[in-house]
Amino acid sequence: MTLGMAALLFVACGEKEGKTIVGLPSDETTDMYEGVEFDMPRVKETSFPDYQVSIADFGAVGDGILSNTTAFADAIEEVSKNGGGRVVVPRGMWLTGPIQFKSNINLHLEDGALLLFSKNFDEYPLVETSFEGLNTVRCMSPIYAVGVENIAITGNGTIDGNGDAWRYVKKGKMTSSQWKSLVKSGGVLNETEDIWFPSESSLSGFIATDNFNVPQTNDRQVLEGMKDFLRPVMVSIVKSKRILLDGPTFQNSPAWNIHPLMSEDVIIRNLNVRNPWYSQNGDGLDLESCKNVLIYNNTFDVGDDAICFKSGKNKDGRDRGMPTENVIVKNNIVYHGHGGFVVGSEMSGGVRNVHVSNCTFIGTDIGLRFKSTRGRGGVVENIHISNIDMINIPTDAINFNLFYGGNSPVLEDDQSAEDEARDETLVPVTEETPSFKNIHMKNIRVVASGVAANFQGLPEMNLQNVTLENAFLEAEKGIVAVDTDGLILKDVKVVPTKGSALTLYNSKNVEVKAFSYEMKEGKPIRVLGALTQKVKLQKDLEAKTELGKGIPDEAIIFE
C-alpha cells in the first residue's frame, strides 16, 4: 500500500492508534483556503480518543418528559475522566437543563435524536457573560462551554432551545391569527397590548431596562427579580479553542442561536440553523472576537441576522480589543433573516481579513449588510466578497449604514431640495468613530430587490475604498452613495423600476467604469452635494448625468 493510499484510508476511517479524528484536513477543508485574498492561517482541527458512552447508560430516558440533566453531566464527566471521546445521544426526545462542556468532548446526536432544553428556568443560573457586545449577567446558556479546548457537536440530530418559553413577541411580527393564539396561551401583555411576555418577571425586566436588552445594573438581587427577561443565547462558547459544529439542526433559541465568543480555531459546517421569523433577537450565528474560523455548507432561516460578525460594543468592545479576523465563509444559503452576511453593529474591536463567497440569499431582508454608528469606534477592513446570488430581497441587496438606526441626514425624508446638498453635521474624529475600508465585492447578481445598493458613510469618516465589480442589480431603486471616498463601480449593470440608476452625494475619488443600465425615463446618473470631489465617469454618461447645485466644475471628470 502506498503512503498516499494509507493516508486516504486514515482520513476515511477516522481512527488510528486509539484516536477518532473529527475535522481532519480533507479535500473539502483544503478547498476552503483556495482563492482567499489574505494570508489565512490553517484552522487547527479537533481530534478525540476512540472512546464513547451513551447517555442511556447513565439513566437517561428519551421520552421528552423526564429530565436528563444529571445523566448528561455524568456522561460528560465519565468521558472527561477517561481522557475524552464521544458522548452519544441516541434516537429519542431527551429533555435536559444546561449542558456544560469539558475539554475533549464530542457530543454526537444520532439520527432521530432531539435534544430539548427545559422550560424550568431554575435550572439556568445567572452567569457573567457578554450579550450584544456588552459585559453583563444573563441566564446560563443551554449549551455552555467556557475555557475549554477540543470540543465538538456532531451528527444529524436536532437541538431545540425551547425559545418560545423565553422570548417576548411583538404583535407586528405575527399574523392576526398567530397573535390571538399566542395571547390565549397565557403570559401577559404590556400596557399598550402590542408586546406579549411569557411571564410577569419577563415584563418587569423589559420595563426596568427601558426596552434595552442589557440591564444597567450588576445588583444580583435586582437581576434575580428579572431573571425570566435575561434570555441566554442557545450555544455559548467562550474563550475556547479547537471547536467543531458539524451536522445538527440548531433551532428555537431563547436569544441568539450560536455565539462563539473570544475563541479560535472554529469550524462550523453542514448545519441547519432555524428560528421563527418573529423571534426577538433570533440571530443565527454571531461570531464575536474570534479568529481562524471556517463557516461553510450551512443553511439559515432565522428571525434576525443570519451570519453576523461582531467584536464588542462601544467602550466594552474597545477595551477588549479583540477583532474578529481570519474567517472564510463559503457555500451557505440564507432564507429569511434581517441580513444574509452582516458585520456589526457591535464591531468596536474591529473586523478584518474576511473572505465570503458562493453564498445564496433567498427572501432575506438585506443581503450584504454593514452597520455601525457614532460611538462604536473600531475598524472594519480587508473584506472580500464574491459570487453572491440574491433573489426577492425586500429592502437593500447591499447596505452600508454608519447611521445604524437611521439614515444620513442627506437622505432623511423630512428635508427638501433633493437636487442639492443637505445639511450634514461634522463631528470630531475620535476613538468612538467607526471606520469601514478596503471592502471589495465582485460577481454579485441580484434579482428583485427593493434597493440595488445603499452606501452611507459618515461626513467625518467616509466609507473608504469600497469596490463593486461585475454586478447585475435588478431592483426597484438603484445605487445610492453618500459620504464615500474611493468608491469604484466597474462592470456594473443596474435595472431600476423607478428613479436613477446611480446617485452620488458628497462623495469623492469615485470611479465609474463600464457602467450600464436599463431605464425608461429620467436621468440615469445624479451627482449631488457641494462636497463632491474627483468623480470620474465614463464619457458616454456625460449627456445622461444630472449635476446638482453647488458642485464645483472641476469635481466631475468624463473620460
Image (cartoon, rainbow, N blue to C red):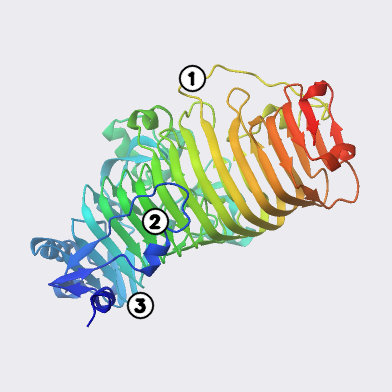
Amino acid type, callout 3: Gly
Q: Residue furthest bottom?
A: 1
Image mark for residue 112:
3
Viewer-side residue, 519 vs 85 = 519
Is residue 59 visible to us here? no
In the rendering, at what x and y percent does residue 420 appear? 81, 25
Number of the front mark, 1 or 3: 1
In the rendering, at what x and y percent does residue 104 appear? 18, 60
Q: Earlier in the sequence, mark 2 or mark 3?
A: 3
Relative to 92, 467 lies left or right: right
In the rendering, at what x and y percent does residue 77 appear? 13, 61
Q: Mark 2 and mark 3 in contact? Answer it, CB < 8 Å.
A: no
Q: Residue at x 27, y 43 (%)?
A: 126
Image mark for residue 294:
2
Secondary structure at badge 3 equals loop
Viewer-side residue, 504 vs 4 = 4
For disc 1, the marked residue is: 430
Secondary structure at badge 2 equals strand
34 lies above or below 61 = above
Q: Residue furthest left?
A: 81
Amino acid type, callout 2: Leu
Q: Earlier in the sequence, mark 1 or mark 3?
A: 3
In the rendering, at what x and y percent does residue 409 appear? 69, 27
Amino acid type, callout 1: Thr
> Mark 2, residues whose alpha carbon is within 10 Å: few (<14), some, or many (≥20)?
many
Distance from Cα at disc 1 to Cα at disc 3: 54 Å
Q: Earlier in the sequence, mark 2 or mark 1?
A: 2
465 lies above or below 306 = above
Image mark for residue 75:
none
